[in-house]
Image (tube, rainbow, N blue to C red):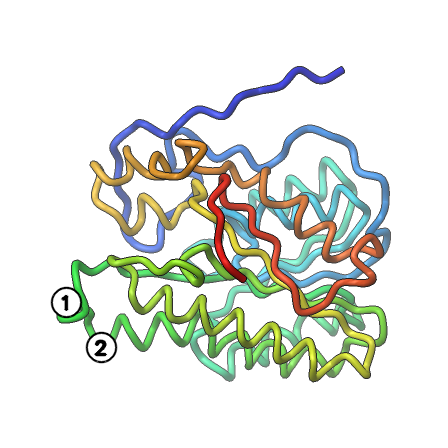
Amino acid sequence: MQKSNPKKPIVKRQSQPHPGMEYKMDPLPEFDDGTSGNNKLFNKKCVITGGDSGIGRAVAIAFAKHGADVAIMHLKSETKDASYTANYIREKFKRKCLTVAADISKEDQCKKAIEKIVKEFKQIDVLVNNAAVHYPAEDISKIKTANLIKTFSVNIYAMFWITQAALRYMKKGSSIINTSSVTAYRGSPELLDYSATKGAIVSFTRSLSASLMKKGIRVNGVAPGPVWTPLIPGSFPPKKVSEFGTDSPMKRPAQTEELSPAYVFLASKDASYMSGQFIHVNGGEIVNG
């Protein structure tokens, strides 16, 4: 029997240029819990935005562990993290992993990335809209217009553009999973624009679910609490990084491997009677919705 491994709070002060790189983090996130898969996603063709690192990396690895082939979309600057993820999947699980560099804040790049993936995969069975950015600000007067536009472009506009492009290659039984946040439900004083996009993702998910019901495509989401990802040292000052997640009921941030099972569940037949729903993996915080 596998021994339990209690997760420890992140305590080290550190910072990085935005949006942060996983290979520079200390400690490194735990993205693979070491368990074996059972092929519940065997031969599924999956697309994950932000799949190079953070939650996206853990999801990509979990999907491959369960027999899927994976395409990860990432920024060109994140190529090192993307290559690590791809090599890990290819070597450990013997599955295909495509890496596609794209700035998803630009509509044309979203469409071109999907077309490139489909040339190889021919179809898309699971789409995970996961990539996001945030730029903390003390109050609304400190939010820069450029950052506001970037946050909405990456976090919500890209979901529309990528989903529009991907749906041409999705059929009955396919699944879309969108990453929202606990901030969509209870807000965040320092992340007003980010929280607004995450709230929009909740409404987008529910509305898209209703829209695609007749086509047999399920649409669900995951709303994480604090998670130890590159965006944290890439966005917050060192002191706040050292305290990150300690205000959650579990008094620590999640490791990314603790998020990925929710995505596997929603992508698989286990969730065949679920659509328009969110799973709250947030360390015990009770939220409405």
Q: Is residue 147 left or right of residue 204?
A: left
* Viewer-closest of 117 and 177: 177
Q: Is residue 278 left or right of residue 19?
A: right
- Residue 145 bears which disc, if any? 2
- In which image quadrant can residue 227 be found? top left
- In which image quadrant can residue 119 be found? bottom right
Residue found at x 59% / y 81% = 111
Q: Position of residue 262 (x, y in %)?
A: 66, 48
Q: Secondary structure at mark 1?
A: helix
Q: Amino acid at mark 2?
A: Thr
Q: Position of residue 279 (x, y in %)?
A: 61, 54
Q: Position of residue 13 (x, y in %)?
A: 25, 32
- In which image quadrant can residue 48 be found? bottom right
Q: Which residue is mark 1?
A: 142
| Residue count near mark 2 (Cα–Cα under 10 Å), binned few <14, some 14–19, many ≥20 | few
Which mark's residue is nearer the viewer, 2 or 1?
Answer: 1
155 up-or-down from 55: above or below: below
Q: Is residue 46 left or right of residue 50?
A: right
Q: Quadrant of the C terminus?
A: bottom right
40 up-or-down from 160: above or below: above
Q: Position of residue 49 (x, y in %)?
A: 56, 62
The span from disc 2 to disc 1 (Cα, nearest Å) is 9 Å
Q: Amino acid at mark 1?
A: Lys
